[in-house]
Image (spheres, rainbow, N blue to C red):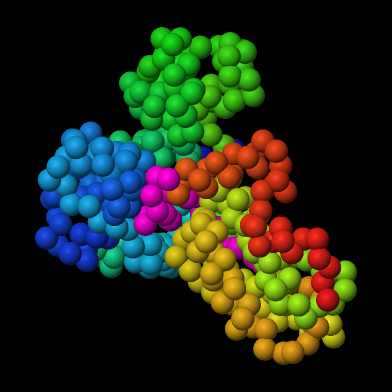
Amino acid sequence: MFDRAILHMDLDSFFVSVECLKNSSFLGKPLIIGGSSSRGVVASCSYEARRFGVHSAMPVKMALRLCPQAIVLRGDMDSYSKHSRLVTDIIADDAPAYEKSSIDEFYIDLSGMDQHFGCYKWSKELRQRIIQESGLPISFGLSVNKLVSKIGTGESKPNGTKEIAKGVEKDFLSPLSVKKIPGIGKETYKKLSFMGVRQIKTLSTIPMKLLQREFGKNGRRLWEKANAIDNSPIVPYSEQKSMSKERTFIEDTLNLRYIRNMLLKMVDELAYELRATEKLTSCVTVKIRYADFNTYTKQRRIPYSSNETVLVRHICELFDGLNERRQLIRLIGVKFSGLVSGSYQISLFDDTTKAIALMKEKDHIRNRYGTDKIMWASYMNEKSRSPS
Ligand SMILES: [Mg+2]
């Protein structure tokens, strides 16, 4: 097998950088982006705020106790999505194949580009172009696989570059904390700490069998990661999955209340799926098929979200704009596309910890008891009736 060359790029404290671009007086100041109310949570914060111990997912109230002089801003997902798309367009222009793995993160497959030197030079030029055209700081890591490159990016931040040459991947990972391995959650970290494993080097020397016994099916992946092994491919942006639902009515219907409730239910289920897989959508589509089989669709680009309240609003607006014929409807459908990875907290800037807790609780009930155990009250009222 020929050597791969995988570039990982990540915009530095992306939301904060966009805010500084809009208002340069924020530069160099401790900045917190999150819910504006007293019960909001931190979605992102500047390096200056991090120095005080502030981190994301922390209640804003607590963050302000650690860093009283911090400036708190409510997030502006519209603006972040716009900047994210601008950077995506620059990469799409230049890169042979790329994967957008989150709103501010990209993998680019440079395999086959002549020499490793060529790849590094190419990467530096792309980075310069992004900085020049978007005004946003971005860092990158370059190596033979996604895992090592991503960790490399982390080590190069802020505003840096890191090349890990073929053959030294393990040396590069060895001294780092196991915390730096992507996908190691709190539980795994706790367990490893308990086993006395803090450095990747230590983890890499534990026999795979032992890790499998301790961590089940994740044990093998853990061993591979510690040993800098990662064969996962780049998933091109155009092939990134969308998710959709369709419903054909038993009888063609004109009952708009019934149809709207059905849309609500589909959005609710899809939004749950987004959150369960930690994804955000940036494009929503509604489909209507009439009794005469004529089919119409309408789509809209939206700021990245997995919040059903936001998504329901877009879907209902699209539906109302699309449904102009006074004809019986045979089928309706909803599709979310342009998916990227991302936690739903970032789409909830104006929500309080309580609102997030409520959504989490709802998801939790579904995880335990199945997706049909929780639904909108309006749908429930409608459920026993038949369409007319
Ligand atoms: Mg970033």
Tell me the quadrant of the picture where the N terminus can be found.
top right
At x 46%, y 47%, the residue is 356
* Number of residue marks: 0
Question: Front-most of 238 and 299?
Answer: 299
Classify residue 16 by image quadrant: bottom left
Residue 29: x percent and y percent? 13, 50
Task: Report the residue at 74% width, 89% height from top.
Answer: 326
Queried whether the magenta region covers residue 30, the answer comes back as no
- Based on the displayed image, in which of its 4 quarters is residue 335 positioned? bottom right
Q: Is residue 349 magenta?
A: yes
Is residue 118 visible to the viewer in this orientation of the structure?
Answer: no
Kindly identify the residue that appears in the image at 46 percent across and 61 percent down.
Answer: 304
Q: Quadrant of the C terminus?
A: bottom right
The extreme right residue here reads 250
Query: Does residue 46 lie above or below 231 as drawn?
Result: below
Decide if residue 181 is on the left or right side of residue 239: left
Residue at 72% across / 90% down in the picture?
Answer: 325
Front one among 89 and 347: 347
Q: In this rendering, is residue 76 above or below 364? A: below
Magenta residues, as a range?
Answer: 334-354
